[in-house]
Amino acid sequence: MRKLHLGVLGSGSGSNYQALHDAITRGDLDAEIVMVMSDIPQARILERAREHGAPHAVIDCRGFASKFPSESQAEVALTMQEAKVDLICLAGFMRLIKSPLLDAFPQRVINIHPSLLPAFPGLKAWEQALDAKVAETGCTVHYVDEGMDTGPIILQHRVPVWPTDSYSSLHQRIQEAEHQLYPQAILQLRMKMDGPYEA
């Protein structure tokens, strides 16, 4: 059985991409990151990919600030297929994915979200949690469907909300949990995979 080929999509700093890279380097995750793509040309995630020598590319979103045009999604799907990607991992990717990318990778696109879904979907979930005065929040790895953070849940990790928490401190602890959870979830999925994943 060959290594699992991961493709990563991100729009920002790429801390979860870094966590996956570190897990692979430590030998905790039998995988290889074969393509990193971002819709933001200057995103730190692309700098990280360059530093690691990972193949990377910028997504052409046709000038749209937030929309992910179908033509752009088709190009991403083709790039990922040409790189022989088995599983696409979203790492802070800020555009909604629909077909044809989901059609090209059915049940093969996953995301990590900073809340215990279905609670607090969407942007700045840690701020939503703190404003709601909940006792705990966390992070969730889930399959991506056409909704916003609505796909089936794969794995979750709980994070307590402390009375002294600020948005920043809570976000930091959730991110630390994310960096542990994402490789675990991928490893769990790897154990279930067959067919095209055989060498």
Image (cartoon, rainbow, N blue to C red):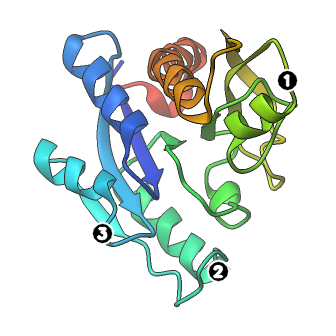
Image position of 173 with respect to 4: above or below: above
Neighbor class of circle 1 (other Cα within 10 Å; few <14, some 14-19, many 20+) is few
- Residue nearest the viewer, comparing 64 with 75: 64
Is 111 positioned to the left or the right of 19 in the image?
Answer: right
Q: Which of 95 and 8 is in front in this view?
A: 95
Q: Mark 1: which secondary structure? A: loop
Residue 120 visible here: yes
Q: Please give the count of numbered marks on the rendered protein.
A: 3
Query: Disc 1 residue type?
Result: Lys
Q: What residue type is labelled 3?
A: Gln
Out of 141 and 30, give the one closest to the viewer: 141
Residue receiving disc 2: 69
Residue 28 shows which numbered tag? none
- The mark found on residue 133 in the picture is 1
User: At label 2, which amino acid type do we have?
Assistant: Pro
Which quarter of the picture shows residue 103?
Answer: bottom right
How far is mark 3 from mark 1, CA to CA?
36 Å
Element marked by disc 3: loop
84 shown above or below 3: below
Where is residue 145? Give x, y as percent.
Answer: 78, 48
Asked whether, in this view, residue 198 is left or right of residue 111, the answer is left
Residue at the image position 34 percent from the left and 62 percent from the top: 43
Q: Pointer 3: what residue?
A: 42
Report crowding for label 3: few under 14, some 14 to 19, many 20 or more residues within 10 A (C-alpha). few
- Residue in the picture at 21% in, 55% down: 47
Marks 3,1: beta carbons within 8 A: no
Q: Pointer 2: residues within 10 angstroms few (<14), some, or many (20+)?
A: some
Q: Distance between the residues labelled 2 and 1?
A: 37 Å
* Helix, strand or loop at mark 2: loop
Instruction: Tell me the quarter of the picture where residue 163 sits.
Output: top right
